Image (cartoon, rainbow, N blue to C red):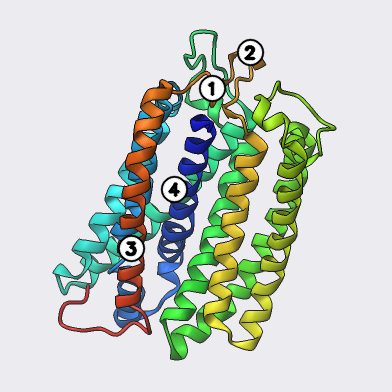
Amino acid sequence: MDYHILWYIIIGILLMGYAVLDGFDLGVGALHLFSKGDHERRIVLNSIGPVWDGNEVWLITAGGALFAAFPEVYATAFSSFYLPFMFLLFSLIFRAVSIEFRSKEESPRWRKFWDIGFSVGSIVATILYGVAIGNVINGFPIGADKEFQGNVLTLLSPYTILTGVFNLAMFSLHGAMYLIVKTEGELQARIKKISFKLYGIFFSLYALVTIVTLIKHPTMLANFSFGKIAPLTYHPIIANHIDMISTVSWGIVFLNMLAIINIPRCLIQGKELQGLISSGCTILAVVLFFSLGLFPNMLVSSMSPDYSITIYTGASSVYTLTTMFHVAIFGMPFVLLYTGLIYWTYRGKTKLGKDSY
């Protein structure tokens, strides 16, 4: 059993869980100012009120797993993205404070200030996530000592800005699909109209990002090509199953297209939950494409392929990975159980009560 691959998969699952779950509440934040009046905005806030902080546990868990399983990847990534990560942290903090503080005062100015803070924090965090992913695909200057050789401006390019904007469109659409499930009446009707526009923006950016990525980084197709493209020396386990990996990868591509096509159909036919599941599956597929295209790299060096950090060169000892795996297989079911229980408890349309935000 190759624990390097297992931990790559585990961290990928944690990031997928975070992208789908926190993706919709970041999207809800990005759309928050489209709601009208105090009542509607409270409905929007309370639609994610019981779940938003639990969703962020997935990111914390993924960060902890990355630190323990791939410490050199963690160290290089956090030193490279130090300033952007600080902006991200401040955005998430300001967003959380906005949710908690908004309804503490009746003043319209007070509430408007925190409404703007909630929305801006959500938008900035979402774009920064996309920029980070774009940099990992693009590669950035990592030297032989695994140290970042650039500055914050090095991380900004037309491609990374494009991936940031794409991520905002994708999460906003996902947030809109969630709000359709949780709201009703005039607010729901307005969100449906916005959703059609968001879908057009998302679909256009999805096609553009895919085309640009394949032109700039054709090696992202390495694991989709049945062994015809081999830019990396694969681990024997991977090399012996490259055709199976490619088959699965193209299967995901096909299912992803079905999910994307199903979103407008669900909007037209009023299939609220099915539409949310389709947008969630779309995000899952995007994260999977990223993971499969990058594998077995974790951080790509633009200075030399030899300086890239892989699941083997950036990992902890096999003993550490093995011990952590046995702990994880007992811990992860509790995370899944907790998440499922919360969503089941707060299912249905959002209603305001005495304990609401």
Disc on res. 337: 3
Kind of residue sitting beneath label 3 = Leu
Q: Earlier in the sequence, mark 4 or mark 3?
A: 4
Numbered disc 2: secondary structure: helix
Residue at figure coordinates x 43%, y 27% from the top left: 70
Q: Amino acid at mark 4?
A: Leu
- Nearer to us: label 1 or label 4: 1
Determine the secondary structure under disc 3: helix
Residue matched to label 1: 312
Residue in front for this viewpoint, 21 or 95: 21
Q: Earlier in the sequence, mark 2 or mark 1?
A: 2
Q: Residue at x 28, y 51 (%)?
A: 94
Residue 107 image offset from top left, x and y in percent: 18, 72
List the residue tagged with mark 4.
14
**Do we see residue 158 in this rendering?**
no
Q: Position of residue 68 (x, y in %)?
A: 35, 29
Report, in whole angstroms, how far the alpha carbon at label 1 lies from the one at label 4.
20 Å
Q: Earlier in the sequence, mark 3 or mark 1?
A: 1
**Percent position (x, y) of residue 78?**
40, 27
For image coordinates 56% across by 52% down, the residue present is 167
Camera-side mark, 2 or 1: 1
**Residue at screen point 65% across, 46% down:** 289
Q: Look at the numbered disc 1 and give the secondary structure of its residue.
A: loop
Q: Eyeballing the image, is 233 above or below 115?
A: above
